[in-house]
Image: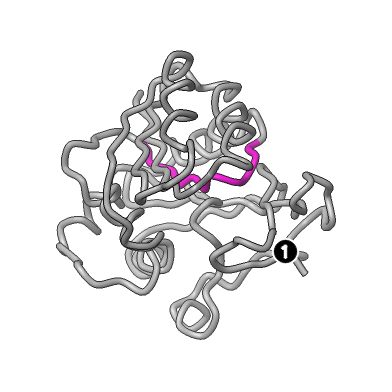
């Protein structure tokens, strides 16, 4: 079994070590490769990644600054990256040790296109839990909900190779956000499995692309 973790980094000095540590402690770490595309960092992000590559399996791509959506999408569409399962990973979150294990256990039951995602807890810039569960109930995984406000973030997702192959065949170049496209296709074509129990800590701070610390 092969698991591809798709991570886009940009000036991640402040939180990247903590996220890398949570990846290194995954129960399925021996089955995973972390594919990192650095989006033109000007701090020591590259040095941090190279340090962690001595402990966990990391493939690093250095690119120019194109923003998170295109950076993640380059990884997702990269034909060099082949696995049984794919997970998006933000540089500033913290994963529970069994995040991948829980998702793959659910997806193994699915033979066709499928995506698993979970609830999360919210932490602030200092790692303090400010909300135990982001979602009080399961999101409405429908096309209408996707178009109105979206339903879940990329860092919550794990998808199988059948779904990834179906999407990459479309050869999509222009996207609003990588996670929006992937989940929309999952809703339209495949199966979406939701776990109400949080499996990671989603950090909100002043530099977030979407959610920001107040």
Apparent side of residue 6 relative to residue 150 in the rendered image (left or right)? left
Local packing at callout 1 (Cα closer than 10 Å; few below 14, some 14-19, many 20+) is: some
What quarter of the picture does the C terminus occupy? bottom right
Residue 173: where, in percent of width, then height?
19, 67
Viewer-side residue, 212 vs 27: 212
Apparent side of residue 212 relative to residue 87 in the rendered image (left or right)? right
Type of colouring: one colour
Q: Residue at x 45, y 83 (%)?
A: 147
Viewer-side residue, 91 vs 32: 91
Q: Main secondary structure of the magenta part?
A: strand
What quarter of the picture does the N terminus occupy? top left
Does 144 appear above or below 91?
A: below
Q: Residue at x 62, y 41 (%)?
A: 15
Q: Secondary structure at mark 1?
A: loop
Residue 212: where, in percent of width, then height?
67, 67
Decide whether residue 93 is among the magenta residues: yes
Apparent side of residue 165 relative to residue 103 in the rendered image (left or right)? left
Give the quarter of the image for residue 143.
bottom left
Q: Residue at x 32, y 33 (%)?
A: 60
Give the quarter of the image for residue 35.
top left
Q: Residue at x 78, y 44 (%)?
A: 127
Decide whether residue 159 is among the magenta residues: no
Residue 40: where, in percent of width, then height?
35, 50
Residue 53: where, in percent of width, then height?
42, 20
Apparent side of residue 189 relative to residue 193 in the rendered image (left or right)? left
Total of numbered circles in the picture?
Answer: 1
Q: Which residue is mark 1?
A: 135
Magenta extent: 85-95
Give the quarter of the image for residue 54.
top left
Viewer-side residue, 184 vs 111: 184
Viewer-side residue, 13 vs 129: 13
């Amino acid at each position: 079994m092969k698991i591809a973790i798709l991570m886009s980094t940009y000036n991640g000095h402040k939180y990247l070590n903590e996220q890398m540590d949570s990846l290194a402690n995954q129960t399925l770490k021996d089955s995973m490769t972390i594919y990192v595309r650095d989006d033109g960092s000007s701090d020591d992000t590259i040095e941090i990644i190279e340090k962690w590559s001595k402990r966990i399996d990391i493939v690093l791509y250095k690119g120019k600054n194109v923003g998170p959506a295109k950076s993640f999408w380059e990884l997702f569409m990269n034909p060099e990256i082949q696995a049984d399962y794919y997970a998006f990973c933000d540089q500033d979150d913290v994963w529970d040790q069994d995040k991948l294990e829980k998702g793959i256990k659910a997806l193994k039951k699915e033979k066709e296109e499928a995506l698993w995602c979970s609830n999360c807890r919210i932490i602030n810039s200092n790692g303090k839990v400010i909300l135990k569960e982001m979602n009080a109930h399961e999101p409405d995984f429908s096309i209408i909900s996707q178009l109105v406000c979206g339903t879940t973030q990329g860092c919550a997702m794990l998808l199988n190779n059948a779904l990834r192959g179906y999407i990459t065949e479309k050869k999509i170049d222009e996207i609003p956000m990588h996670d929006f496209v992937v989940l929309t296709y999952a809703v339209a074509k495949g199966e979406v499995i939701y776990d109400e129990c949080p499996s990671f800590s989603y950090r909100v701070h002043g530099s977030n692309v979407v959610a920001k610390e107040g």
